[in-house]
Image: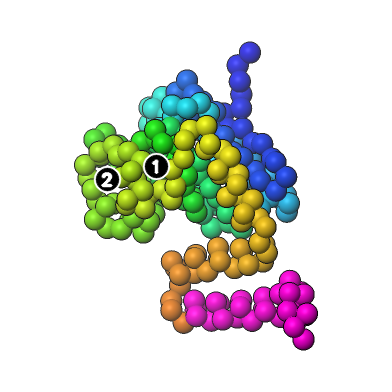
Amino acid sequence: MINNELIKLECKSNIAILRLNRPEVHNCINDKAMEQFENHLDKIEADHKIRTIIITGTGSKTFCAGGDLHYFASLKTHDAVIAMSKRMQAIMERLMYGKRVVIGAVNGQSLGGGCEILTTCHFRIAASHATFGLRQAPNGLSTGWGGGRHLFKLIGRSAAFQMLLTGETIDVPEALRIGLINKSVEPDDLMRSAIDMADQINKNAQTSIEVFLKLAEKVEFENRKAVFEYETESFAELFMGNYFRNIVKKYE
C-alpha cells in the first residue's frame, strides 16, 4: 500500500509534531506535500490546546532536501513558478509569525529548501550527524521560499553570504558557531530534547508567549515607536491580568 501521508501530523497533549514523510526522496516537498502542510496547519491553528509545533523528518538520513525535482520539472511557466514560490512562502509565514512556537528537530541533512524551512523555526535542535547546505547557487537558482531574507537576519550578512554564495555544506559545530542551530544532541535524544524544550515553553503563560512572538514580528517590520508602544502596552495588560495578579496577590 502506498503511504499517502507525505507529511504526518501527530498531536501529543499540547504539542503538534509535523513529520516530513518522504524518505525515499529525502523528504522533498512537492505540491501534494504543500497541500498536506496547509491542511495540517489549518487543524493546528483551530486547536487552541496546541501551543508548540515540532518539525522533523522521517528516518535518520535527511531532514529535508528542499523541493522535489520531479515536481519542479513540471513547472513550465513563469507564473507557475511564482505561484509555487508564493505558496510555500505563505506556509513558512504561518509558521514564523503564528501564535505557536516552532521547533525544528533536524534528524539528518538539511539542503536547499530544507534549510529555508529551518530559518522559519524559532528554535533549531540538530542531531550530531546533521549537515546543512544552501545548494541553490550551484544549481543556478536563488532561494525561493523566503529563506534568503530570513538567513541574513538569523546568522548575519557575512555568514549568510558564505553559505549562499559558496553552496558549501557545513556540519553541526559550524552551524552552532554561526547560530544556524541552537543546540546539538545525539540522534537518539533528538525528539526527546525537542519535546522537553516544548514542555518547558508550555509551562509558561500562553499570553506571554504570544506577546513575545508578536514582538519579534513587530521588531522586524515596524518602526521603533510602534515597537516601543506595543511592548509597553503589552506589559501593562499582562501586569493587570489574572495570571500575574494571582502571583503577586500574596504580597498585598
Range drawn in magenta: 226-252
Question: In the structure shown, which secondary structural element does the residue marked by tag 1 occupy?
Answer: helix
Q: Amino acid at mark 2?
A: Met
The quarter of the image holding the C terminus is bottom right
Q: Residues within 10 Å of mark 2 (few under 14, many from 20)?
A: some
Q: Is residue 6 left or right of residue 127?
A: right
Residue 228: say if magenta.
yes
Mark positioned earlier in the residue sequence (2 or 1): 1
Question: In the structure shown, which secondary structural element does the residue marked by tag 2 occupy?
Answer: helix
Q: Is residue 73 above or below residue 104?
A: above
Q: Position of residue 93 (x, y in %)?
A: 51, 53
Instruction: Give the camera-side residue of 185 and 224.
Output: 185
Q: Is residue 59 above or below residue 2?
A: below
Q: Residue at x 66, y 46 (%)?
A: 15
Q: Position of residue 195 (x, y in %)?
A: 60, 44
Residue identifier under label 2: 163
Q: Residues within 10 Å of mark 1 (few under 14, many from 20)?
A: many
Q: Is residue 187 visible?
A: yes
The quarter of the image holding the N terminus is top right
Q: Is residue 88 visible?
A: no
Q: Amino acid at mark 1?
A: Cys
Q: Position of residue 229 (x, y in %)?
A: 53, 81
Give the alpha-carbon distance from disc 2 to disc 1, as whole Å. 11 Å
- C-beta proximity under 8 Å, tags 2 and 1: yes
Instruction: Give the camera-side residue of 71 and 82.
Output: 71
Residue 5: say if magenta.
no
Residue identifier under label 1: 115
Q: Residue at x 66, y 36 (%)?
A: 10
Q: Position of residue 155 (x, y in %)?
A: 34, 55
